[in-house]
Image: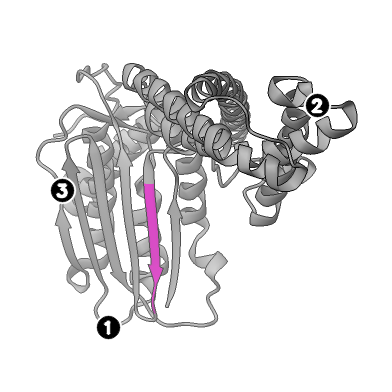
Amino acid sequence: MTIIQHNYTENGVRIRNFSNSHMQQNAFIFSEEKKYRLRRHLAFWVFWWLFFGFLYSYTGKVSLLPNVNRLPIALIESLFFLVSHMFLAYSLMYYIIPQFIFKGRYIRAGMLVLFLFFITACISAIIGTYILPSVRYALFSIPYYDTVNATFLLSLLAGLRGAITIGGIAAAIKLMKYWYMKEQRNLLLQKENLASQLQLLKAQVHPHFLFNTLNNIYSFTQNTSPEASSMITGLSDLLRFILYEGNKPLVPLDNELKMVQDYINLEKIRYGNRLELHLDLPEQTNGLYIAPLLLLPLVENCFKHGTSNVLDQPWINLMIAVREKQLQVKLINGKVNNPAITETEHGIGISNVEKRLSLLYPDKHELTITNEEELFIVNLKIALEQKEMTEEPQPRELQHA
C-alpha cells in the first residue's frame, strides 16, 4: 500500500512546489530540510549571542569591571539570557504570527505579544537577579552588593528592552520570508497560467465553429438516435464549461459539480450496466466558489486508470459534502493490480491537481492519496470562498429539445 499525503501548514510558508532551482540556490535561507533549518537557526543564535554579549559588556555591572574581564563575563551571562530570548522568538514565529497575524486576528495578536514581552522580561529579570550573581561569584569571584528589589526592577526593564529587540528581529525575519515566498508563489502561478494559455492558443478551435458543428450533429441524431443526442448534449455542456469558465479564477461550486456530473453521465453511457456507481453530491453549496476544473481530473483518473482496466465489474464511489465553508471529497475506485502501470502513468492528472492546489490553496487544503493493490482512494478537503451567487449569461449555441 502506498500513501501520499500533502498537508500544508497554516502559515502558508511550506510551499511544496516552489521553484526547484530557486530553492537549490538559496537552500540555506528557504529550504525546509532539517539540516538547513538547524544551520539557519544555529547561525542566527550564535550571531545574536555574540552581538548581545558584546553589547552587554558595555552596560550594567559588567561595564564597571576591567576591560580584560568585560567580554568573557558578558558572553557567559548572555548565554543564560538566550533562554528567555528563544522563548519569545519561537513563540512569535511559530504561534503568534501563523495563528493570528496571518489569519487577520490582529487585536488578539497584539494582546498576546504584550503578554509575551512581559513574561520574557520577567524571565530575564529572574535570571539577572537570582542566577547570574551566583555565576559571577563562582566563576569570577565578583561579589553581589546590590539589593534584590533594585536589581530585579532594573533587570525587568533591561529584559523588556531585550525582549522588544529580539521580538522585533524574529518577527521581521518571519514576515519578510513569508511575504517574499508568497510573492514568488504568485509569480510562479502567473507563469503557470501563461503557459496554460499558450497551450490553449496552440490548439484552439473557435467556440462558435465547435458548437455549431455539435448543433448540426445534434439535429441529425435527435430523431434517429436519442442516446447519441443525449451524449452530444452532455458533451456540449462539458465543453461550454471548459471554454467559457475554465479561464476564470473562481466559479460557483454548483457549476463545477454539474460539470463533474455531466462527465460522469457520459462515461455511464459508455459503460452501460457494467459500471457500478455510487454518487453522493450536496444539495446546497452555500454560495461557495472554487477554482475551475479542479475536481474533474480526479474523477477522470478513476475512469482512465481504474474502471477501464477492470474487466469484470468496474465500480466508483464518489462522495462530496459541504461543511460550512469546507469542501470534502472522498473518491474510491476499484483497479487492477498491474505492476506494469507505473505510478507516473497513474497520476499525471493527480500531479496537476497537486500543483494547482499548492498554488491556489497553499494553506487551505489537505490531500491524501492511498494507492492499494485493488483500491485507489482520494481524500480532499478545501477551504473555499463564499460569495453572493451571480450567474453570468453564457452562450447557448446548442439548444436543448
Q: Nearer the viewer, mark 2 or mark 3?
A: 2
For the point 40% across and 62% down, the residue is 369
Task: Say which mark, if any, is on residue 312.
Answer: 1
State how many labels appear. Answer: 3
The Cα–Cα distance between marks 2 and 3, rounded to whole angstroms, is 77 Å
| Mark 2 lies on residue | 65
At label 2, the amino acid type is Leu
For the point 38% across and 25% down, the residue is 115
Q: Secondary structure at mark 3?
A: loop
Discs 1, 3 touching: Cβ within 8 Å = no
Looking at the magenta stretch, what is its main secondary structure?
A: strand
At label 3, the amino acid type is Leu
The segment highlighted magenta reads 366-372
Seen from the viewer's position, the closer of residues 33 and 15 is 33
Could one spot residue 206 in this view of the protein? Answer: no
| Mark 3 lies on residue | 281
